[in-house]
Image (cartoon, rainbow, N blue to C red):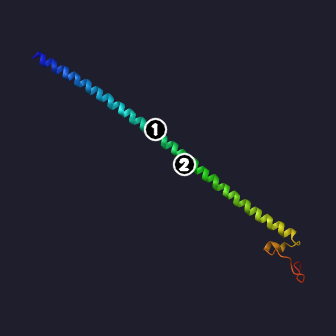
Amino acid sequence: VNVILLLCYVILFLGNVILSLGYVILFLCYVILFLCYVILFLCYMILFLCYVILFLCYVILFLGYVILFLGHVILLIAGHVILACTSYGSMYNLLGRCYPPDSGSSYNS
């Protein structure tokens, strides 16, 4: 009877050891899972920063196009002013008439 009782205690002890190992393995799995979530969070943060940088690049590109458009407008206005002030001395060229006036007509009257 004592041998059977001793055998039951040994089996119970081995069961507790195996159960403790199971809890240790489960704890390690939770630690690994937590580390995976941390790495995933960091990846999402890096992705978010990449999207922010991409958005800033698009904003800078848009501002570049706006500056380019304003440069074209300034060049167009400056070109018309130069053309109007140098072509036959007539400011009427600002209205788009870039041809020489007829000899019979007078723009200065």
Would you identify the image quadrant in which residue 76 lies?
A: bottom right
Q: Quadrant of the C terminus?
A: bottom right
Q: Residue furthest left?
A: 1
The residue under the point 54% across, 48% down is: 51
Q: Check whether the beta carbons of the residues at disc 1 and disc 2 lie within 8 A of each other.
A: no
Q: Give x and y (percent) for residue 84.
A: 84, 70
Tag 1 secondary structure: helix
Q: What residue did someone put label 2 on?
A: 51
Q: Is residue 15 left or right of residue 63?
A: left
In this orientation, which residue lies closer to the viewer: 27 or 3?
3
Q: Give x and y (percent) for residue 19.
A: 26, 27
Q: Is residue 43 left or right of residue 26?
A: right
Q: What's the CA distance linking mark 1 and mark 2?
A: 18 Å
Report crowding for label 2: few under 14, some 14 to 19, many 20 or more residues within 10 A (C-alpha): few
Question: Any mark on residue 95, and which?
Answer: none
Q: Is residue 69 left or right of residue 13?
A: right
At label 1, which amino acid type do we have? Ile
Q: Give x and y (percent) for residue 28.
A: 36, 30
The residue under the point 35% across, 33% down is: 29
Q: Quadrant of the N terminus?
A: top left
As drawn, 58 above or below 30: below
As drawn, 11 above or below 49: above
Q: What residue did someone put label 1 on?
A: 39
Report crowding for label 1: few under 14, some 14 to 19, many 20 or more residues within 10 A (C-alpha): few
